Image: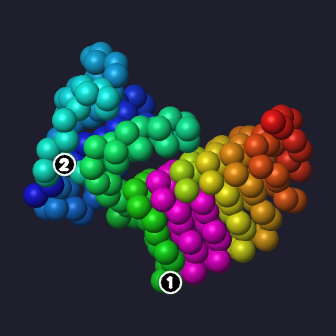
């Protein structure tokens, strides 16, 4: 049996811990070993969680360790995943049993899905993507690496999303829209046209409020 370690012991880390406990693989294929976090007191006000084992930087990976990254910031996620991979660490998917993933969908490494997520047919999901609860992803959608999709997002068919995108809660991406790399879509926004790289958009319809 493998030992699952969660990178990040803050709010999202605790959520992922509880998602993991509801997965069919828990205590069958892997058990929860603990968290990696540079703040040793992150769980002091909480009970019922496995321990913080130390920071990523100093943790010595054991042969049975596997990892999942529970960091909401896509750039921090990239940084710490690569630290672990540089030490030879392996990542697994954490897919809540209420998630629906249709046929012919390709899933990359390190996927996390929350309760009641829906991923339709013939999608391509990149590496280290997070899909939060009650999100709907339509057919033939492509999502790049290290994306974070928050609660209650709707993504229409044939949408293409680049790497390192963050879609905040309640946002809507209409069918066939293309979203570039390093894009942030604000809470409750409706995206009706292409969004270029390194832009933040907000509103209904969404407009650029920041661009590098």
Does label 2 or label 1 sit earlier along the sequence?
A: 2
Number of numbered discs overlaid on the protein picture: 2
Badge 1 marks a residue whose secondary structure is: loop
73 in the magenta segment: no
Q: Quadrant of residue 113?
A: bottom left
Percent position (x, y) of residue 48?
20, 32
- Say whether residue 188 is visible: no
Q: Say which quadrant the N terminus sits in.
A: bottom left
Snapshot colouring: rainbow
User: Which residue appears farthest toward the left when viewing the image?
Assistant: 1
What residue is rendered at 45% in x and 65% in y? 108
Residue 49, located in which quarter of the rendered image?
A: top left
The picture places residue 17, in percent across and down from the top left corner, at 31, 42
Is 75 rendered above or below residue 154?
above
Say which mark, if any, is on residue 104. Answer: 1
- 161 to the left or right of 67: right
In terms of depth relative to the viewer, which is nearer, 83 or 206? 83
Residue 176 sits above or below residue 54 on the image: below
In this view, the residue in front, 14 or 65, is 65
Image x and y of residue 62, in percent: 14, 44
Horizontal side of residue 140 vs 78, given as left or right? right
Q: Quick one: label 2, few (<14), some, or many (20+) residues within 10 Å?
A: some
Q: Is residue 125 magenta?
A: yes
Q: Which residue is situated farthest in the bottom direction here? A: 104
Residue at the spot of label 2: 65
Local crowd size for mark 1, using a 10 Å CA cut-off: few (<14), some (14–19), many (≥20): few
Q: Which residues are magenta?
A: 116-144
Residue 99 at x, y = what percent?
A: 44, 65
């Amino acid at each position: 049996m493998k030992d699952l370690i969660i990178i990040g012991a803050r709010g999202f880390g605790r959520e992922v811990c509880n998602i993991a406990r509801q997965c069919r693989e828990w205590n069958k294929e892997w058990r929860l070993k603990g968290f990696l976090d540079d703040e040793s007191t992150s769980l002091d006000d909480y009970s019922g969680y496995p321990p913080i084992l130390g920071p990523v930087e100093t943790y010595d990976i054991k042969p049975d360790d596997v990892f999942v990254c529970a960091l909401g910031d896509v750039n921090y996620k990239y940084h710490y995943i690569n630290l672990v991979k540089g030490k030879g660490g392996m990542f697994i998917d954490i897919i809540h049993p209420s998630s629906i993933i249709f046929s012919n969908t390709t899933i990359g490494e390190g996927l996390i899905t929350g309760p009641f997520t829906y991923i339709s047919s013939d999608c391509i999901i990149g590496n280290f993507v997070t899909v939060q609860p009650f999100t709907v992803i339509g057919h033939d959608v492509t999502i790049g690496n290290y994306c974070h999709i928050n609660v209650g997002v709707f993504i229409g068919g044939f949408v293409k999303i680049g790497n390192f995108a963050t879609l905040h809660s309640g946002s809507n991406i209409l069918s066939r829209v293309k979203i570039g790399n390093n894009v942030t879509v604000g809470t409750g926004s409706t995206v009706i046209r292409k969004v270029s790289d390194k832009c933040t958009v907000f509103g209904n319809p969404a407009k650029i409020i920041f661009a590098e």
